[in-house]
Image: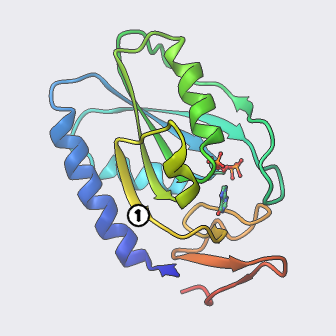
Amino acid sequence: MILTSQQIANRVRRLGTEITRDYQGRDLVIIGVLKGAATFTVDLARAIDLPVVMDWAAVSTYGRGSTAGTPRLLKDIGEELTGRDVLIVEDILDTGTTLSWLMARLRERAPASVNCCVLLRKPHAVAKPVEPRYVGFDITEHWVAGYGIDYAERHRNLGDIHEVRLPSAALSASSS
Ligand SMILES: O=P(O)(O)OC[C@H]1O[C@H](OP(=O)(O)OP(=O)(O)O)[C@H](O)[C@@H]1O
Ligand code: HPA
C-alpha cells in the first residue's frame, strides 16, 4: 500500500470542504496531536475556509518502537476550551488508545463539542468506542510511515505514506 502525496492532497482538500460546511458560524479550535499529525494539521487547516484557532498537544504512546504503551502528555493545550467546538486532528487511529485517552481529558474541560478528524484508520480501531467524525482513508493493519508519521522517529519527512516492512523497517517504495 502506498498513498501518494497527490492522493493525500486531494483527500485533505475534500475534508477541509466538509469541515468548512459543518462548522459555519461556530468557534472552531483545531488541536493537532504532535508529532505525527503536524503535517496533516497544517495542510488541513489551510483547506478550511473559516477563522479557526490552532493549538497543539503532544502525546506519546509508542515511544521509539511499534508497541503501544500508556499515553503520556508531553505538551498540554494552552487555549481555553470551555464552550468551544474542539476538533482533534490525528494522523492515525490504530488501537484507539491515544485518541480515547485524549478525548476523555479534553471533555473534562467542558467544550461545547469534541470531535476528531483522522487521516488514517486501521481495522483494529473499528471495534473501539472512538468514532471519528472525519476519516481520510481506511487502511490495512501494516505499520506505515511518511507525511508526518514515523517509524522509530524516522521517515516523517516523506511526502507519500509507505508501508514499513517490520522488523527490517524497509519502506515499501522509495521516497518521491
Ligand atoms: O491508536 P493508537 O494505537 O493509540 O496509535 C495512534 C497514535 O500513535 C502515534 O503516536 P506516537 O505515540 O507514535 O507519537 P508521535 O505522534 O510523536 O509519533 C500516532 O501519531 C497516534 O497519535
Ligand atoms: O502504523 C503506524 N505508524 C506509525 N505510528 C503508528 N502509531 C500507531 N500505528 C502506527
Q: Position of residue 147 (x, y in %)?
A: 54, 66
How is this picture coloured? rainbow
Question: In the picture provided, is 82 more to the left or to the right than 71?
Answer: left
Q: Position of residue 92 (x, y in %)?
A: 55, 54
Type of amino acid at the residue the image marks with label 1:
Phe
Which residue is pictured at 64% across the width and 25% down the height? 76
Residue 78 visible in the displayed image? no
Residue 81 occupies quadrant: top left
22 versus 41 height, above or below:
above
* Residue that lies at the very extreme toward the front in this rendered image: 127
Q: Which residue is mark 1?
A: 137
2 versus 66 height, above or below:
below
Question: In the picture provided, is 28 more to the left or to the right than 26?
Answer: right
Determine crowd level at label 1: few under 14, some 14-19, many 20+ residues with C-alpha closer than 10 A: some
Queried on whether the Cβ of the residue with tag 1 lies below 8 angstroms from ligand 2, the answer reads no
Residue 11 occupies quadrant: bottom left
Which residue is pictured at 51% across the width and 81% down the height? 2
Residue 77 visible in the displayed image? yes
Which residue is pictured at 60% across the width and 53% down the height? 94
Residue 64 occupies quadrant: bottom right
Q: Nearer the viewer, residue 122 or 92?
A: 122
Q: Nearer the viewer, residue 130 or 174?
A: 130
